[in-house]
Image (cartoon, rainbow, N blue to C red):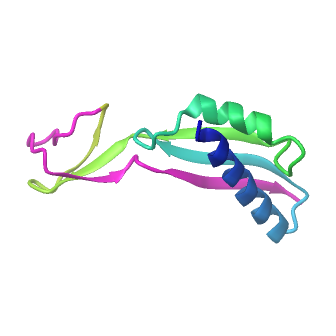
Amino acid sequence: MHEYSIVQSLLDSCEENAIKNNAKKVTKVVIKIGVMSGVEPELLRTAFETFKEKTLCEEAEFVINMQQIIVKCNSCLVESTIEGIEYYCPACQSPDLDILDGEDMYLMQLELDF
């Protein structure tokens, strides 16, 4: 379960930011997970709730926003959101796509209490 190591890195990053900004605690953590990231949202949530104890994130609300797959077609240059594993352009049906978003996980927002 790589979600545990991801959460440990996330908590470390949150604590570093809180300390750097002289915050007493983190009250909210917002992340964005791409549907192609390989990260299981519920396992990540469970890991966060488990490991946040005795950190500055102990009372933090954890918000997960899912990012759909956004592609740009190299044939017709249209940007589209695709569902599931449809690796073709919805506009022209070309399989020649570049993925613009939906593969990564990002820390989007931290709310800190001073």
Foreground of the two, 105 or 65 = 105
Query: Which image quadrant: the C terminus?
Result: bottom right
Residue 7 occupies which quadrant of the picture?
top right
Q: Residue at x 60, y 47 (%)?
A: 31
Residue 84 image position (x, y, % from top left): 31, 31
Image: 22 above or below 112: below
On the picture, is 74 further left or further right than 17? left
Q: Residue at x 79, y 58 (%)?
A: 15
On the picture, is 24 further left or further right than 94? right
Residue 76 is inside the magenta segment? no
Residue 98 occupies which quadrant of the picture?
bottom left
Q: Residue at x 9, y 39 (%)?
A: 93
Residue 92 image position (x, y, % from top left): 8, 43
Residue 67 image position (x, y, % from top left): 45, 42
On the picture, is 30 further left or further right than 79? right
Query: Which image quadrant: the N terminus?
Result: top right
Start and end of the magenta stretch? Answer: 85-114
Q: Residue at x 68, y 54 (%)?
A: 9
- Number of marks present in the image shown: 0
Foreground of the two, 57 or 40 = 40
- Furthest residue in direction bottom, as rendered: 20
- Furthest residue in direction front, as rendered: 1
Residue 90 occupies which quadrant of the picture?
top left
On the picture, is 49 further left or further right than 9? right
Residue 76 image position (x, y, % from top left): 10, 53
